[in-house]
Image: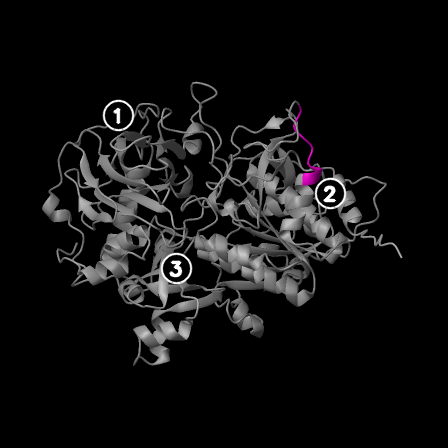
Amino acid sequence: MSKNQKSKEDLGNFSKVYGKLRMMANGSNEVNAIRAITNQTIAIRKQVIDQKDYLNLTQQMTQKVSLAPEVTFLEPEVKKRDKRVKKASLKKGDIENDPPDQVAINVFMELRGSSTWDDVLMDIFPKLPIRHINKRIKNVRKRGNIIKANIILDDLKLLAACEHIINIEGSQSVLTPPLTNFTFGTKHRPRGSTLSSNLPNIKSENAIIGIIDVGGFDYAHPDFLNEDGNTRFVAIWDQGGDFRPAPSATWNEYIEFNYGSLHTQEHMNNAISASGTIFAPIHSIEPQSQQYPSSHATHVASIAAGNSGVCSKADIAGVLISLPKEDEERTKSFTDSSRISDAVDFLLKLAKDKGKPIAINISLGTNGHAHDGSAAVNRWIDNQLTVDGRCLCVATGNAGQEKGVTPDDFGFIMGRIHTSGKIPNKGLSVDLEWHVIGNGISDVSENELEIWYQPQDRFHVMVKPPGAEWIGPIKPQQFIENQQLIDLTFLSVYNKTYHESNGNNYIGVYLSPNLNTQKIVGIKAGLWKVRLIGDEIRDGRFDAWIERDDPVRRVENFWNFPSFFSETTNVDDKSINSLACGHNVIAVGNYDTENDKINISSSQGPSRDNRQKPEIVAPGTNIFAANGFSGPDELWTRKTGTSMASPYACGAAGLLLATHSGFTSMQIAGIMKRTATPITGLNYDWKNDTGFGNLNITACIEEAIRFQDFKDITED
């Protein structure tokens, strides 16, 4: 880590860069190449670490991530290491001699109102030929005054110094469902969705259902075939695929989408037809980069638009968010919110080209930022949903559980991600208890805590590692960056006022393992404390979220286990994922139809700015739908989660758009809220877990028909 002090000008410029980006930019190529093994938001452009060393590092992480059997989640104990690694041998690289110029990251940059991207390039690269600029800055796209681009970390200092840029925000990790999980399949087909016989015939073929997901789309499953045996999928963009050319190479007007593979309907139908002739599996003839048994994407698509689903005759378009295929590919791919924005734009363009309205479903999530719709990806998507004929449904997430139901139920570790409180007066303080678990000894994944509070207040912050002294205070407009602690953990804390995205104050606390090719030393497991102390109090309220990994297996025995708040610190609301906090999207919770209640895992609202999220809930518990990439006797299976509830609402949105293609996303949300059925025992008031109630598709369509009956009663 560089010992050089930044100038006042550099510090001022770098204040516009999000804390997490700055922390990563402060590491060397080698450190960030190791970080990319587990971090979804960065990737390396060239090989930085010797292949032998890389495999050794992956093996170290595999061993260190496996959960120790003696871990007690409620009161984690920290075990001492037999031998302490010498601190001197584990320093991060010297970024002055080894700048992160081989490490790429996706960023969202907010421009000044009158500035253009050409102005930015002329400012930072006045003499560099465009062909060289295009090698450094890639995948540049614009929505409103926000620019999304893939850059190298070392260029952050140039971009931060540019007067045309007022904010630089990194992408967020996308929380993905388990890639493989044990399911019971059956050959018995589920009963399809039915509407009231009193309704007019809804021509759902006039709409498109778009699905953004992971795991692979089983386009040849019987639930997606029409009467001719052809697939109803019109396209699949596999962002991590390489079997087919990218969309830009297949369809000239899709020049912005220049990575991954595009599978057209013709490609898929040819594979279905050829399979019986050459006696080869369909998905070997036309493969995707992800083809997991019991695929999440397939199940979600089946609920929304399968032949047994809600919008059963609509065209279907899918986007697979990139996931690494093998250990050695982990450092080269992104699974982040920038890919979500690309996926949304691709589907909207496809629908426009086909002249049809579209309802899009995202059963993935993000947990960073302020949960008020101010994150760049929220604003990007909101901007796209101001046009009619478009609707987007997002699963609220599965972080609703705060306590174990049984002694061996640890589902609460997924739910304890939010806290809030109030510092009543100057000089008073609040302690946040933050459990870091890992494997019970250390955690080789990075841990993040973000605190947001009102601009009229001033807090300073202190951090106490397990068994160590308090560090700080870090006052407003101060930070510490990659400070190495005695146990070799790196700590970064940023205390920033007037954040560019929303004008609120922000404190970011980041814990990083020692990422070194000799030996990886994880973050010390145990109870970390973060103390907020009031300097000036006019309001005193704050909210905080943990950006955590899901406890799922990624590759081989590589497990991620999240950190979480203690029971006393956790506050059981505002656990809705930040992607669902957009102003123009519909957030959907999980209703347990059989037990007539909200599923315990369903995330709760409201948003941080107290908007009514989720809008509605829909059936999401034990939902019977297509079992992707499985045998003929296991074509159908059940799954539970808000991932299953959201596509149900998306299918309903597709029916509404088929009824009236001029609806906006907000109008559809209004119809759903107006016609929702209250949960038994509740009234029509919005609740933080039930929204306005359970989605009623028949009532939605009836209301949509009434909406179109607009009469002139002006007297002559």
Magenta stretch holds residue 362: no
Element at label 3: strand
Q: Is residue 515 left or right of residue 663?
A: left
**Quarter assignment of residue 404:** top left
Residue stretch in magenta: 674-680
Give me the disc on residue 700.
2
**In the rendering, at what x and y percent does residue 466 appear?**
22, 30
Which amino acid type is marked by label 2?
Cys
Mark 3 Cα-neighbour bin, 10 Å: few <14, some 14–19, many ≥20: many
Which amino acid type is marked by label 3?
Asn
Element at label 2: helix
**Is 95 drawn above or below residue 224 in the view shown?**
below
Q: Nearer the viewer, residue 333 or 563?
A: 563
Q: Label 3: which residue?
A: 106
Report how far apart the C-alphas of labels 3 and 1 lie in the structure. 37 Å
Q: Which quadrant holds the C terminus? A: bottom right
Magenta stretch holds residue 679: yes
Residue furthest out toward the front: 716
Q: Label 1: which residue?
A: 77
**In the rendering, at what x and y percent does residue 21 appear?**
31, 54
Element at label 1: loop
